[in-house]
Amino acid sequence: LIVAGNETTRNAISGGVHALANDPASWRRLRRDPALVPTAVEEILRHGSPVIHHARTAARDVELRGVKISKGETLALFYPSANRDETVFDAPEAFRIDRRPNPHLAFGVGEHVCLGAHLARIEIELVLRHLARRVETFEVLGPVERLASANVGGIKNLRVRMRMARLESASKPA
């Protein structure tokens, strides 16, 4: 639980900072309108998909989009693919902090939903709110180094320059 919560939350946050640095208009909008923070958190989770995959065993025979899956077969569930499904998400490659609905599967679903999903959302929200009060702009300084992992999608190294907000802006609640 400790490793899962640490890896996924920090990778969601770094992925969110990267996405927001590449979309300055969304960052300005988020800073102006703190009501967007909860939907931005969900979009960060969908867009970044910090968990790459899990294996599951089919509990019963089923057919999914014309493919027969037999009870007992092992399936690999790829979350980044599911979170970019064009039959579920309008403009799935776009990062949109106001995306609604956002039925992403970043934390799994049903009986396999992540136990720490609520805590992760709170942590990501707190980081976004604090950054929004204190950071006017982000600038990525060079290439992003991604983790070499089959399980966790994340950033190993992201060099960012931040332009800090003026003191009066920094005191506004987000």
Image (spheres, rainbow, N blue to C red):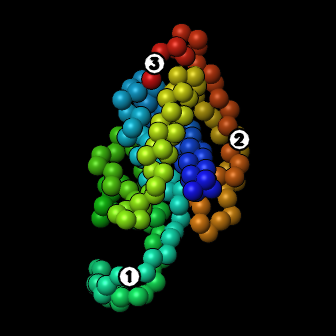
Between the residue at mark 1 and the residue at mark 3, the CA separation in whole angstroms equals 48 Å
Location of residue 41 with respect to 163 vertically, above or below: below
Labels 2 and 3: the sequence-earlier one: 2
Residue 94 image offset from top left, x and y in percent: 42, 50
Residue 88 percent location from the top left of the image: 30, 61
Q: Is residue 85 left or right of residue 7?
A: left
Measure the C-alpha gap from mark 2 to mark 3.
27 Å
Q: Is residue 165 left or right of residue 102?
A: right
The residue to which callout 3 is attached is 173
Amino acid type at mark 1: Ala
Q: Is residue 168 visible?
A: yes
| Mark 1 surroundings within 10 Å by alpha-carbon count, few (fewer than 14), some (14 through 19), many (20 or more) | some
Q: Amino acid at mark 3?
A: Pro
Residue 6 in the image: state x and y as whole percent.
61, 50
Residue 161 falls in which quadrant of the image?
Answer: top right
Residue at image position (56%, 29%) is 131
Q: Is residue 105 above or below residue 28?
A: below
Q: Pointer 1: what residue?
A: 58
How would you rate the neighbour count of disc 3 (Cα within 10 Å): few for under 14, some for 14-19, many for 20 or more? few
Mark 1 vs mark 3: in front: 1
Which comes before the other along the chain, label 1 or label 2? Answer: 1
Q: Which mark is residue 26?
A: none
Residue 143 visible to the viewer: no
Q: Position of residue 41 (x, y in %)?
A: 44, 42
Q: Which of marks 3 and 1 precedes in the sequence? A: 1
Which part of the image, by quadrant, shows the C terminus?
top left
User: Disc 2 designates what residue?
Assistant: 159
Amino acid type at circle 2 is Arg
The secondary element bearing badge 2 is classed as loop
What residue sits 37% from the left and 40% below the top? 39
